[in-house]
Every structure is written in C-alpha cells, then in structure tokens.
Image: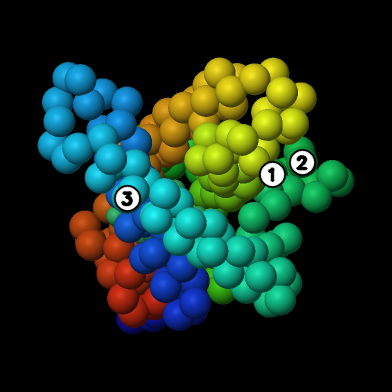
C-alpha cells in the first residue's frame, strides 16, 4: 500500500509560496525595465516600483527562511550537500541520481532516493538548492546597491563600480531563470504530474514511491 510522508511543514510552504510569487514579479519587472524599448507591457516606473516592493518582500521572506532553518537545525542536514569526509559517497549518489533522471526514469526504474523529513532532498536537489539559497544574499545585496547607489557608494567603489554590481545581479538572474525552468520540469516528475506541486503548495505530504 502506498504511504504518505510529511515533508514540507507549513512555514516552509508559506515561504515557498511567497518566494515563488516574488521571483516571478521580480523577473518580469526586471525584464520589463531592461527591455522596455522592445516591448512595453507596463511603464518603466511601474516596473521599478513593483521591483522595489517585491524585492523587499523577498528579503524579509529570506530572513524568515534562514531563521526557521537555523532554529530547527535542519539547514545543515538539508542544505549542505556533504560533510568533508563524505564527499566521495555523495558524488557516487549524485551520479546514481543523475543516471536515474537520464535513463532509469524513462524505463520505469525506482527512484534511488527515498525521501524522509530529515533527508528529503536527493543529491541533485541538495546541490541545486544549496546554490539557490547561497546565491540569494548576493542577489539581495547587489539589488540593494542598485536600489540606492548613493547609500552604498563606498561598497560599490570597493567592488569595482556600479557596472560590476549590475553584471553580478544580471548573471545571477540568468542563473535563477535557468534554475526555474529545470525546477518546474522536475516538479512534475512525481508519481503524478501534480503530486510534488500539491505537496509543496498545499498538503505538505509526499506520496512514498
Ligand atoms: C510556480 C513555481 C514553482 C513551483 C511549481 C515549484 C515547485 C516546487 C516543489 C514541488 C518543491 C518540492 C521539492 C521538490 O520537488 O524539489 C519545491 C521546493 C523548493 N523550491 Fe520551488 N517551485 C517554484 C518556484 C520556486 C522558485 C522561484 C524558487 C527559488 C528561486 C524555488 C526554490 C525552491 C527551494 C529552495 C525548494 C526546497 C524548499 C525546502 O523544502 O526547503 N522554487 N519547489
């Protein structure tokens, strides 16, 4: 009989909801500000205002995420891919998981990772979520510098000028855009098309394989 396992507690689901909404508004308003000369869906000023408002919501939400995962102590078990002595085993598991997504899944093999609350991410998720959350402070700090360059002028000069800051912000945006495309695809690879999405956005319960 298929069981269910509670993987995504309510605070994590709320964080993910808010984070997903913020990312979509930030991406769209950011693209509108940059490419407004090609296609103008909303005015530059409206896009700028939306970008600032949702940027600050994202920052507050990021702090809530960091506090929650530190208080529960789960940040290390979930978001750090491997301890120094376990890198070899982790790389082997990473290869097994990649082979499953590249081939095993297509011929109906079992997913090699059995999710549990204390180890809910497979090795590929661990690596990608690690970098997604590690780069978040860099995206936030560069965003704050672009929001008010006068206030951060010393730091901006120290880091090579506003163009460098803007380039870092745009490169990370490209990273996040690519992540979201892959993330959305993987989100549909559960037992049914919507089962992972339902678990993360509504119930918190994942079906066991
Ligand atoms: C509508 C858009 C999105 C959907 C449908 C979606 C779907 C999911 C699903 C199903 C999970 C559960 C775990 C898994 O299967 O990997 C998950 C977890 C996660 N997602 Fe998303 N996601 C979306 C947007 C985003 C965005 C924009 C980000 C950040 C840039 C993000 C970052 C994460 C992270 C870090 C986790 C792990 C959360 C945790 O359990 O600690 N997601 N997402």
Please determine whether, in this image, residue 90 is positioned above or below residue 178.
below
Q: Does mark 2 have its CB less than 8 Å from ligand 1?
A: no
Tag of residue 90 = 1
Front disc: 3 or 1? 3
Q: Are marks 2 and 3 in contact (CB under 8 Å)?
A: no
Q: How crowded is mark 1: few (under 14 residues within 10 Å), some or many (20 or more)?
A: some
Which numbered disc flags the more N-terminal residue, 3 or 1? Answer: 3
Q: Mark 2 points at which residue?
A: 87
- Disc tally is 3
Front disc: 2 or 3? 3
Which residue is outermost to the front?
Answer: 150
Rendered residue at 54%/57% (across/down) = 59
Q: Does residue 145 appear left or right of residue 197 in this picture? A: right
Residue 193: percent from left, percent from top = 21, 57
Residue 207: percent from left, percent from top = 36, 72
Rendered residue at 64%/55% (across/down) = 79
Quadrant location of ligand 1? bottom left
Real-space Cα distance between discs 2 and 1? 5 Å
Q: Name the secondary structure under disc 1.
A: helix
Q: Name the secondary structure under disc 3.
A: helix
- The answer to whether one can see residue 93 in this image is no
């Amino acid at each position: 009989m298929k069981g269910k396992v509670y993987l995504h507690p309510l605070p994590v689901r709320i964080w993910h909801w808010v984070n997903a909404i913020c990312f979509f508004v930030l991406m769209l308003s950011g693209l509108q500000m940059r490419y407004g000369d090609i296609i103008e869906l909303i005015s530059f000023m409206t896009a700028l205002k939306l970008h600032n408002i949702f940027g600050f919501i994202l920052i507050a939400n990021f702090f809530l995420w960091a506090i929650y995962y530190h208080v529960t102590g789960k940040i290390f078990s979930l978001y750090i891919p491997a301890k120094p002595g376990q890198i070899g085993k982790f790389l082997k598991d990473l290869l097994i998981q990649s082979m499953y997504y590249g081939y095993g899944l297509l011929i109906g093999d079992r997913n090699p990772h059995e999710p549990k609350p204390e180890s809910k991410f497979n090795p590929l998720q661990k690596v990608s979520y690690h970098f997604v959350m590690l780069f978040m402070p860099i995206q936030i700090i560069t965003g704050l510098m672009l929001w008010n360059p006068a206030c951060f002028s010393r730091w901006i000069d120290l880091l090579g000028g506003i163009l460098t800051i803007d380039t870092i912000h745009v490169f990370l945006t490209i990273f996040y855009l690519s992540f979201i495309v892959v993330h959305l695809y993987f989100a549909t690879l559960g037992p049914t098309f919507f089962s992972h999405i339902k678990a993360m956005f509504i119930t918190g319960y994942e079906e066991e394989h």
